[in-house]
Image: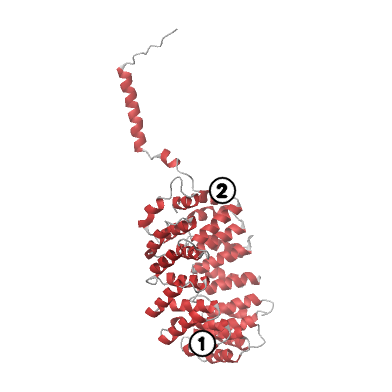
Amino acid sequence: MRTLRHKRIPLVVVLLCLGFAASVLEAQDASEPIAEETSDEPDPRGQSLRYGIESEVLGVLEDLREERNSSYNDLLLDILPETRQPAILRAVYRLWDETEFEGGRDAARDELRRVLDDEAFDETVLQASMVYLASRRDRDAVDDLVRLAEHRDSSIAASAVRALGRIGDSGDISLEPLLVRLQDADPVADEDLVAALIVTLGQTRYREAAETLVSIAEDEGASAGHRRFACVAVGQIGRPGDADVIERIYYDADDAMLRSYALAGLAEFQDRDSTDILIGALKRDSFWRIRVTAAEKLVDANNDEVSELLRYKAANDPVDQVRIAALKSLGSGASRADRRFLLDYYGDDGRSPETRIACLEVLLENQISGTPEAILEVMNELWDGDRTRFLEYTLRSLSRAEWSALAPVFERALTHDNWLYRVYAIRGIRRSGISTLEPRIREFDVEGADPRVRREAARTD
């Protein structure tokens, strides 16, 4: 049997080897920790957006829109030129609209120019891009929108006209072509375009259109929809003397829906106080839509009589839509009594879940003091059992809010056994920028945690 003998390695060789190893380690220390970075798990959402099939991409975009998550907007801007699938493009513009992303304006304007340059386009994508540009009040798109408002396709023209109306005050926009088109349009063949023109001329308060709009409002032979829109538009322009015409329509018309629009138009006149008419309508009118309009338009009537009436309607009106409209008006500039009423309303399990959640939205939107405490009370009551899913709906609303005062509510929700509650809490914490609770979130990014909660906790967006 042969025996192995260890050969003696000269000391100089050992030293040379050690020196070489040290130099390698030193070079690695000075460089970026590449191995550590490449070991990180890839972002599944980013990968789906880059490489996924249409259904995968649409699923991610819908989730992002639901969360109002803006962290992938720049990525979408980079990959947008790679696709012309209409469904994806529409979803991207809707996400950008929802998240108030400013960086997509050039891409959206390119959609307008496709039409003007007679290139291939998809009308639904064009409409989505117009809505996005209008929501961003993009003045650089105005000239192209005015040109599209004269397009031979009335549906394209109507979309462009609506976008101009949403951009707002006419300023340096020449609206005369829109008025001329309204005067020349066939109200039957171009019904949608005429409606859009009426609404936009009112929204932009184009005074030269007042006479034409009054004639439409008064014309009993005109389309019911056109008359309704004209009543509001006349009020928005607010020419002295026209209020008498709209008031007469409100009192004399047989069409209850037309009366509700006339009431809304009366409330638009800036030099006329219509509070008494609105109060009477909210109190007594039997048509619920008129009561909704009255409740909505009483939002700025800051007096005790109106507040008491709104509280009564929020508590007792037989129609939920009226109750919700009253709750919203109470939340704007709420007095101490109104705030107490809203907090008690949300906490009252004797009321319908729909109106209670609507009340919560009012509390969150106006950041009314005492709201976190009221939510914690409801949470404690439903902690061990929530057959109506009311706590789930509450936390879903909270996940979309931006209010750091909700930190105690989110911290409590993180301790619940229901995975969905914890996911909503994590989203709410990050949307509200509550950095003090980030360590609590990281506790869920561990082996053994619910994979849905862990996935939410692991996100860096």
Any part of residue 207 in sight: no
Give the position of the C terminus as an image quadrant: bottom left
- Residue at 30 percent across and 18 percent down: it is 11
> Residue beneath label 2, please?
51
Q: Nearer the viewer, residue 289 or 120?
A: 289
Q: Position of residue 298 (x, y in %)?
A: 47, 83
Q: Disc 2 residue type?
A: Tyr
Q: Nearer the viewer, residue 227 or 363?
A: 363
Q: Is residue 19 left or right of residue 138?
A: left
- Residue at 60 percent across and 80 percent down: it is 180
- Residue at 51 percent across and 51 percent down: it is 45
Q: Nearer the viewer, residue 138 or 324?
A: 324
Q: Position of residue 434 (x, y in %)?
A: 38, 59
> Residue beneath label 1, please?
283
Give the position of the N terminus as an image quadrant: top left
Secondary structure under the numbered disc 2 in the rendered image = helix
| Residue 209 versus residue 45 in the image, above or below | below
Q: Disc 1 residue type?
A: Lys
Question: Residue reaching furthest top?
Answer: 1
What label sits on residue 433 in the rendered view? Answer: none
